[in-house]
Amino acid sequence: MEILVCVKRVPDLSENELELNGSDIERDGLVYSVNEPDNYAVEEALRMVQDSGGHVTVATVGGSDDEEVLRREMAMGANTGVLLSDDAFEGSDGRGVATILKAYVQKNNFDLILTGVEADDGAAQVGGMLAAMLDYPFASLVTSIEQNGGKTIKISREIEGGAKELNEIDLPCVLSIQTGINEPRYVGMRGLKQVASREIPEYDAAALGVAGVGAAGAKVTRLDYFLPPAGAGAEMLGGDRDENIARVIELLKAKGGVS
């Protein structure tokens, strides 16, 4: 099975204390790592090809600094890392990133495309947009994958209320992988050294044949980052049970909860 996993380099929250800076976070001096949900997606792809054979490609939209996450995932076991990089890609919104990935997918023959459930912006858009652009089936919040003879796969996905939903989905398809689907394997310095000199193919806008992406083509623009104003603290009730019940009823009436 030919599997593409879309990954992203993000600030490592275990190594950084983030500070807001207008419409972005303060990025000087930040330590970066692979987006955690994407790492689960790579592990799932590796387990699938271990079971049935195939090839795992990891791709990212970014610059030269983003090669580090590709090499990390290659040290983890991915066969190929691909960098989709061009100054014209800077400032792309979710739709722009999906457009770039779509162009790369159409130059290849992937049976399955995996993304993490979300990246650092938290919008969880790219997987669904990419599937729509390719006219592929899509499922999000995927918590297990079972191979089913080559033309379909069986998946479970997390839905509201802690329940799970079981589906059979045609290939090729796009799946957004939920964290916790597996336990990603450890990547040590030896593995990183082994892939340090491996070639990473790079595709720019001309090679991919894409236009209308980047900041100029973005339909969504981040205006600001801010912390919500702190509200009043909780009221702690210190009376006996009957007094507390009476006070709760009084508060509910005051706020329209009961009449």
Image (spheres, rainbow, N blue to C red):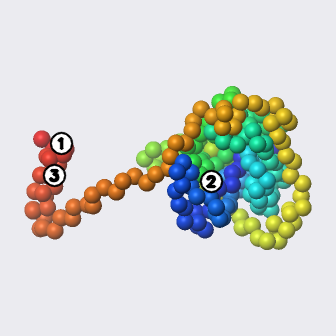
Against 106, residue 124 (above or below) is below
Q: Which residue is mark 2?
A: 37
Residue depicted at x 9% and y 62%: 242
Which of the marked residues, 2 or 3, is nearer the chain's N terminus?
2
Which of the marked residues, 3 or 1, is nearer the chain's N terminus?
3
**Disc on res. 251:** 3
Q: Which mark is in front, 2 or 1?
A: 1
Q: Position of residue 157 (x, y in %)?
A: 56, 45
Q: Which residue is mark 1?
A: 256
Residue depicted at x 17% and y 48%: 252
Q: Which residue is nearer to you in this view: 125 or 114? A: 125
Q: Which residue is nearer to you in this view: 48 or 217? A: 217
Graded by Cα atoms within 10 Å as few (under 14), some (14 to 19) or many (20 or more), the crowding at tag 2 reads: many
Is residue 19 rendered to the left or right of residue 35?
A: left
Graded by Cα atoms within 10 Å as few (under 14), some (14 to 19) or many (20 or more), the crowding at tag 3 reads: few
Against 21, residue 221 (above or below) is above
Type of amino acid at the residue the image marks with label 3:
Leu
